[in-house]
Image: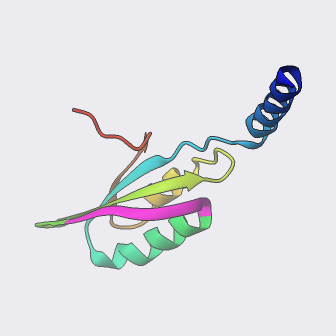
């Protein structure tokens, strides 16, 4: 009975190990000057990310900043270059993110 149980548990563990994929999310921080840049930014992020959510949005005098948590498609980070080419975008930063902020 113990041998049969150990074999079954081992098979279940092997099944879960091969099926589980770990996707590392990234933080995408975009600084831009005018609100007119928001629509093209959102469109490009939606096209190139498998999943994205807004984590924060800051409006500073003369500048705006938006932070997305993104899960990218097939390690394609080229869209960061596309984002930085949008008129009005001042900077674009992508950071690896494991879900925790530590200081």
Q: Position of residue 82 (x, y in %)?
A: 52, 58
Q: Residue at x 75, y 39 (%)?
A: 16
Foreground: 50 or 9?
9
The image shows residue 86 at horizontal and vertical percentages of: 43, 65
Q: Nearer the viewer, residue 59 or 54?
A: 54
In-front residue for pair 101/6: 6
Horizontal and vertical percent position of residue 92:
38, 51
* Main secondary structure type of the part rendered in magenta: strand
| Residue 31 counted in the magenta span | no
Q: Is residue 82 left or right of residue 101?
A: right
Q: Residue furthest front?
A: 1
Q: Which residue is rendered at x = 15% and y = 67% of the image?
A: 62
Magenta segment, which residues?
Answer: 48-58
Q: How is the image coloured?
A: rainbow
Residue depicted at x 21% and y 32%: 103
Decide which of 99, 36 is in the foreground and name it: 99
Could you tell me which quadrant the N terminus lies in? Answer: top right
Up the image or down, 4 lies above or below 59; here it is above
In the image, 37: left or right of 63? right
């Amino acid at each position: 009975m113990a041998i049969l149980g150990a074999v079954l548990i081992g098979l279940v563990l092997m099944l879960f190990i091969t099926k589980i994929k770990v996707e590392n999310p990234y933080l995408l921080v975009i600084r831009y000057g005018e609100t007119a840049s928001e629509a093209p930014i959102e469109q490009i992020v939606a096209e190139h990310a498998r999943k994205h959510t807004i984590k924060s949005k800051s409006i500073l005098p003369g500048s705006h900043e938006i932070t997305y948590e993104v899960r990218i498609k097939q390690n394609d980070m080229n869209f960061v270059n596309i984002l930085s080419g949008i008129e009005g975008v001042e900077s674009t930063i992508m950071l690896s993110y494991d879900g925790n902020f530590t200081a």
